[in-house]
Image: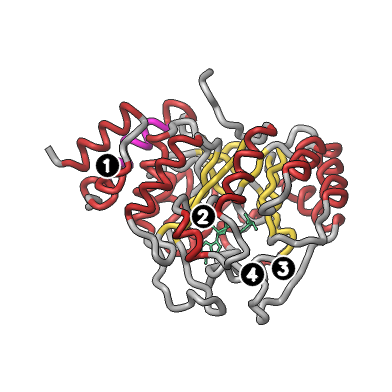
Amino acid sequence: MNDALFLTDKLACDHSLSLEEYALLISLRDAKSQQYIAEKAASVRKTIYKNSVFIRGLIEISNYCKNDCLYCGIRRSNSSCERYRLSEEEILSCCDEGYLLGFRTFVMQGGEDPYFTDAILCGIISKIKNKYPDCAITLSLGERSFESYKRLYDAGASRYLLRHETADECHYAQLHPKEMSFDRRMKCLKDLKQIGYQTGCGFMVSSPHQTNAMLAKDLKFIEEFKPDMCGIGPFIPHRATPFSNMPSGTAELTCYLLSIIRLIHPPILLPATTALGTLDEFGREKGIKAGANVVMPNLSPSCVRAKYELYNNKLYSRSESAQEIEELKKRIRNIGYEVVTDRGDIRLNK
Ligand code: SAH
């Protein structure tokens, strides 16, 4: 029997492989194993979420960032990045518009912008919660202290996305400047979980210097940490970063990893990301067919969308745009799934 199919069956049954087996499974990817694992992952996902696809309205609140991640287009040393930050009124009006379009989760994402103190964020979060008590608020604002995460949680945020970026400490140092710490990032994830957030980690596929052994560590980390959500998307270079000449990841490897992650932790909320849709015209559909169950269209005011440029040619129109939700629904219906208006919490069978 083909080893990749054997390992896939083992993973589907045990939700666990050794580091060596994960690396082998990745290296054995071919058209046949890719299809086999995608079908397994889609069927596992269907037993929990039927054919529902959850939507999240993404509001990119600021592209100011005090960090200097080597891969990221909004890193502080990119002087060609035109900076913006949204006001409280602008953020609230994004939510008003999103609510009318059917969104019941708002994701506030941004660079690490010191302007957004706990007091300012708590004010915004409690206003959104007051106005839309039936909605979930997700934050993706980088590393903060335990106390800060706790204040934001107490103000009404219930989910937090913080990609771990890589579970290999040496690789982490190849992607980040010296002042950033792998241990601190991992501690943030543990803090978030301890506070009670639905917590999301994640990584880029084919980020510079990444090997299959490193990806195996990412998968092992997911297996052990059991995040509620996991954001993965292909690395795509940005012209004004040190990695401008590095190759992009592929939609195929990204989808293969989505399937593996679905089998590791069946109830996980797994987005088909914008980066996947940017790389491949049908990336999001491919992601959903491979086991993803979330899409996050952009609700940011259209005048700032182009400025939140994490990588070259980031998509922000057509079905990436919340205003084009009808087109997105149609595309998802075409592959046999249904966009639902629902907070879309994780369904753990406890
Ligand atoms: N400041 C927040 C949000 C970061 S942007 C935080 O630290 O969590 C969200 C994600 O975009 C990052 O976690 C990173 O994995 C991804 N990203 C950044 N640059 C990218 C690139 N060049 N290609 C693909 N994804 C990228």
Q: Nearer the viewer, mark 3 or mark 1?
A: 1
Q: CA distance from mark 4 to mark 3?
A: 13 Å
Asked if 22 appears above or below 178 in the picture, the reply is: above
Q: Position of residue 76 (x, y in %)?
A: 67, 72
Task: Check disc 4 and report the residue beneath it.
Answer: 74
Q: CA distance from mark 3 to mark 1?
A: 44 Å
Q: Label 1: state its secondary structure.
A: helix
Q: CA distance from mark 1 to mark 4?
A: 36 Å
Mark 4 within 8 Å of ligand 1, using the beta carbon: yes
Task: Check disc 2 and report the residue beneath it.
Answer: 165
Give the mark nearer the N terminus: 4 vs 3.
Answer: 4
Give the mark nearer the N terminus: 3 vs 1.
Answer: 1
Residue range of the region highlighted in magenta in the rendering: 35-45
Task: Check disc 1 and report the residue beneath it.
Answer: 21
> What amino acid type should be assigned to the residue bearing mark 2?
Glu
Q: CA distance from mark 4 to mark 2?
A: 16 Å
Of the four image quadrants, the one with ligand 1 is: bottom right
Task: Check disc 3 and report the residue beneath it.
Answer: 304
Q: Residue furthest top?
A: 350
Mark 1 within 8 Å of ligand 1, using the beta carbon: no
